[in-house]
Image: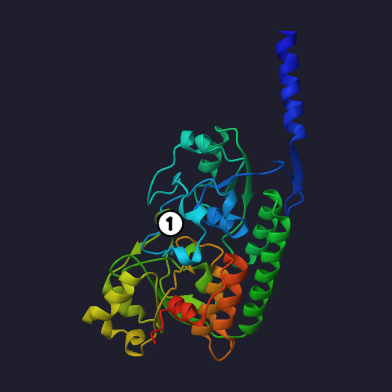
């Protein structure tokens, strides 16, 4: 019995010696392992955060990288990322997660999304794996710099995390300053296949659109974890938004091919915009670090008279810093869906 007790004590001391203590923004001590080799994000926003910090430290994906909302083109992504296994997600909409699969991939740390509607369930499940976790806010645009910095320090990428945080802070402050006193513009966020799925005005899925000076015409309480609230075209017609933001190409094409959409003010004025998705969606699904360029794109659409940036130059800067990709002018046009 004494021998077993000594072994347990030795194990505890060994584990403690291989841990480091961080302070979160509330001043609370958070213990994480030293020398993180692999990490996993339990939700898409957290997993894509890892990509921005260091794709080589990702242990797996929540869902297939290429889908209707994310182009995942090889020219913009690392080979390591594209070869990762799909471990799964707690959130539906794809492959359900299996705790044995997480353990099999042996991440040293798991990132939890503080704003996740299922966060308590996710915490409870992951605790069973005995893998260390940290919890990060990432819903609000203003929380993103902290998440870059804290996650970077946690996975031993502090200089990188601080660099991304600094850039994000400058963009966020700039957009906020430019919109002071601005009248929000009425927008509709068209999702799904036919464009008649959307989000409530308070949903995290439209956080970037609201931050960029938009006012969502669909007022409601979210009815499901995944969002994608269904509405009728008659309801949309009564909203008659000034601008329509189409989440993916299927929606965008449907808006212009289905004659009933021509009755909307935004369509008549040709104010329908397709969200860029190379390599990941700039706005949503997932709401990732791409929102740093997404809010610049949106603000220039919503309030061009107030936000007079050189968008092409900003895209070039963002892709260089966050994705380690040096873009040509042709690639920028391709990203924005512009034709020669």
Report whether residue 284 is seen: no
> Which residue is farthest top?
1
Report whether residue 78 is seen: yes
Which residue is painted at 70% across and 50% down in the image? 156
Horizontally, is 96 left or right of 77 in the view? left
Which of these two is toward me, 304 or 80? Answer: 80
The relative height of residue 176 versus residue 116 in the rendered view (above or below) is below
Colour setup of the view: rainbow
The relative height of residue 281 versus residue 95 in the rendered view (above or below) is below
Q: Which residue is mark 1?
A: 65
Quadrant of the rendered structure where residue 309 is? bottom right
Horizontally, is 244 left or right of 23 in the view? left
The relative height of residue 87 versus residue 259 in the rendered view (above or below) is above
Counting labels gives 1
Residue 290: x and y in percent read: 54, 67
Residue 239: x and y in percent read: 36, 79
Residue 100: x and y in percent read: 47, 33
Which residue is painted at 50% across and 56% down in the image? 79
Name the quadrant of the C terminus. Answer: bottom left
Residue 62: x and y in percent read: 46, 49
Horizontally, is 3 left or right of 142 in the view? right
Mark 1 Cα shell of 10 Å, populated few (<14), some (14-19), many (≥20): some
Name the quadrant of the N terminus. Answer: top right
Which of these two is toward me, 236 or 287? Answer: 287
Which of these two is toward me, 107 or 97? Answer: 107
Tag 1 secondary structure: loop
The relative height of residue 107 versus residue 269 in the rendered view (above or below) is above
> Which residue is farthest left?
259
């Amino acid at each position: 019995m004494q021998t077993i007790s000594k072994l347990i004590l030795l194990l505890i001391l060994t584990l403690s010696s291989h841990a480091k203590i961080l302070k979160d923004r509330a001043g609370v001590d958070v213990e994480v392992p030293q020398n993180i080799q692999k990490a996993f994000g339990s939700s898409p926003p957290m997993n894509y955060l890892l990509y921005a910090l260091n794709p080589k430290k990702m242990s797996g994906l929540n869902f297939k990288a290429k889908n209707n909302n994310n182009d995942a083109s090889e020219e913009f992504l690392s080979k390591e990322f594209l070869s990762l296994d799909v471990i799964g997600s707690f959130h539906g909409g794809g492959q359900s997660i299996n705790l044995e699969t997480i353990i099999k991939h042996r991440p040293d740390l798991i990132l939890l999304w503080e704003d996740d509607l299922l966060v308590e369930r996710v915490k409870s499940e992951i605790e069973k794996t005995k893998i260390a976790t940290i919890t990060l806010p990432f819903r609000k645009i203003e929380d993103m710099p902290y998440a870059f910095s804290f996650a970077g320090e946690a996975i031993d990428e502090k200089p990188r995390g601080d660099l991304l945080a600094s850039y994000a802070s400058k963009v966020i402050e700039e957009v906020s300053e430019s919109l002071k006193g601005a009248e929000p513009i009425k927008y509709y966020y068209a999702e799904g296949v036919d464009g008649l799925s959307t989000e409530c005005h308070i949903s995290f899925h439209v956080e970037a659109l609201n931050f960029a000076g938009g006012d969502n015409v669909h007022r409601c309480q979210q009815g499901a974890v995944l969002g994608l609230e269904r509405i009728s075209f008659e309801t949309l017609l009564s909203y008659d938004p000034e601008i329509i933001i189409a989440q993916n190409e299927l929606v965008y094409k449907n808006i212009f091919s289905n004659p009933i959409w021509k009755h909307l003010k935004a369509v008549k004025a040709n104010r329908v915009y397709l969200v860029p998705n190379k390599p990941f969606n700039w706005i949503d699904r997932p709401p990732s670090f791409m929102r740093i360029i997404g809010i610049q794109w949106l603000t220039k659409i919503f309030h061009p008279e107030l936000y007079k940036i050189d968008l092409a130059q900003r895209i070039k800067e963002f892709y260089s810093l966050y994705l380690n990709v040096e873009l040509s002018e042709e690639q920028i046009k391709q990203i924005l869906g512009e034709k020669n």
